[in-house]
Amino acid sequence: MTRPNILIFMVDQLNGTLFPDGPAEWLHAPNLKKLAARSTRFQNAYTASPLCAPGRASFMTGQLPSDTRVYDNAAEFASSIPTYAHHLRRAGYQTCLSGKMHFVGPDQLHGFEERLTTDIYPPDFGWTPDYRKPGERIEWWYHNMGSVTGAGVAEISNQMEYDDEVAYHATRKVYDLARGHDERPWCLTVSFTHPHDPYVARKKYWDLYEDCAHLLPEVGPIPYEEQDAHSKRIFDANDWRSFDITEEDVRRSRRAYFANISYLDDKIGEVMEALEATRQEAIILFVSDHGDMLGARGLWFKMSFYEGSSRVPMMVAAPQMQPGLVTTPVSNIDVCPTLCDLAGVSMEEVMPWTTGESLVHLGQGGTRDTPVAMEYAAEASYAPMVSLRYGKWKYNRCALDPDQLFDLEADPHELTNLAEVAAHQGTVQTLRAKSEARWDLAAFDAAVRESQARRWVVYEALREGGYYPWDYQPLQKASERYMRNHMDLNVVEENQRFPRGE
């Protein structure tokens, strides 16, 4: 069979509520809107875990963090767990990554045959949380509210430099694929770090949102004393007492965040333009790893099961799937089996250990009624938290906290916890039973604590004496690039041109 090419765009910390049916009308995102028009659009897509490394490992494997053991941003991603890159490569694909995937551990490829950039974050165990020390802030890597108070305009930043490089290498790779030197089908993953904070944007994008009507969240700040238990932990982890967040700070942060969506749109447009100019066809997937609260309830960043943090945009443009809106709740753990399904690649050998489900039939008018599961066991938590999105309901459970139940149709901003309301006890009991059947929270907690304790020992040991970091170093063979004396100039000029002879 002829297997399709696959192009994956992943972004970081993009709030899915801004994509009710593709990008919101008021967002300046022409390339994403063009893609949305020909895509199956999943309105209620969720991360497996609202944090970078756990969410991305789950996206790549189709497994929850409790299965991958990637609990936080410093948990090792085991080489023995197959990813979509492994499945596709095994079936004859060339697999390539340009950009971020936040792999932790000595394996920095996880099935990718080629990686064009290094990562933006460290791959070692230095960011390991410690459940043994509740309330401790690790100053050098914990988030704080400086991203909010420092929001504004910049023409270059650490993250812009990175995403400029990601787009450049991805575009060059698309041109190279068009040359046809490798006849295998390809899967190219292009993974950006925007619109992740800090909330800093180039002026050309900042200016697009001067008169934006959405610079304040629909739900304003809630006093600390009135927040739920986990949100209080997030406030404390983010060192909120050290900052005076003004309404202008909120406006500037959200404006920069929206501006960076437009920046990303341009970067994605560069890659898409190269694809179209070289007349290549590919299935295209667009997804984020998790969202951003963007000041709603006074919360920022992620680490929460609230919609702004846990809901992500997801769109698939594929011949096997019809353009249109799907409202059925789905997860980014469904990506791996969906890609394999679209490519005609079997995952049968590992499906007993895979939580994700193919979404292809939902793009053909099909239905499903399985709950969407989420987990969180990283900073700002001191015991694992779990969640089920089932129909209109979201049910959250943690051994430390009261249960939460929200009716997302009647209460989309999750302002009313129904878990203790007498009229909803039947729903609570049903969802609690489903949750308890899926998770043993005591065993989950024990596994997280074991992992954290071991990693602290290893990290501290490896920083003593000789230091051999795991940071990925992209390989460029200068002796095989452009024109060298072991090459025939005429052959080089002909082979590196696309199209040839026109």
Image (cartoon, rainbow, N blue to C red):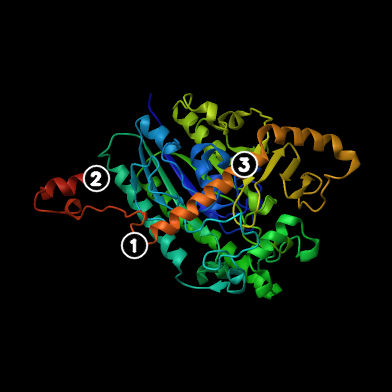
Q: Is residue 100 left or right of residue 501?
A: right
Disc number lying in front (1 or 2): 1
Position in image of residue 14 (x %, y %): 58, 54
- Residue type highlighted by circle 2: Glu
Please identify the quarter of the rendering in which residue 330 is found.
top right
Check disc 3 and report the residue beneath it: 444
Where, quadrant-wise, is the N terminus in this rendering?
A: top left
Q: Which is closer to the viewer, label 3 or label 1?
A: 1
Label 3 secondary element: helix
Q: Residue shown at 34%/31% (left/top)? A: 92
* Residue at figure coordinates x 70%, y 75% from the top left: 246
Q: Which residue is labeled 1 in the image?
A: 465
Q: Residues within 10 Å of mark 1 (few under 14, many from 20)?
A: few
Where in the figure is residue 332, as x and y percent of width and height?
57, 41
Specify which label sits upstream in the sequence, 2 or 3. 3
Question: At which x and y percent is residue 152?
Answer: 56, 73
Q: Which SS class for mark 1?
A: loop
Of residue 226 and residue 210, the one placed in the foreground of this image is 226
Whether pointer 1 and pointer 2 mark residues with C-beta atoms closer than 8 Å, the reply is no
Q: Residue furthest right?
A: 422
Is 47 left, or right, of 155 in this rendering?
Answer: right
The span from disc 1 to disc 2 (Cα, nearest Å) is 59 Å
Q: Residues within 10 Å of mark 2 (few under 14, many from 20)?
A: few
Residue type indicated by callout 3: Phe
- Front label number (2 vs 3): 3
Image: 493 above or below 194: above
Q: Residue type at mark 1: give it.
A: Gly
Residue 375 position within the rendered picture, expressed as x and y whole percent measured from the top left: 63, 44
Query: Would you name the residue on which mark 2 appears?
Result: 502
**Category of crowding for the residue at label 3, using alpha-carbon neighbours closer than 10 angstroms: few (below 14), some (14–19), many (at least 20):** some
Secondary structure state at the residue bearing disc 2: loop
Spatial CA distance of label 2 from label 3 is 61 Å
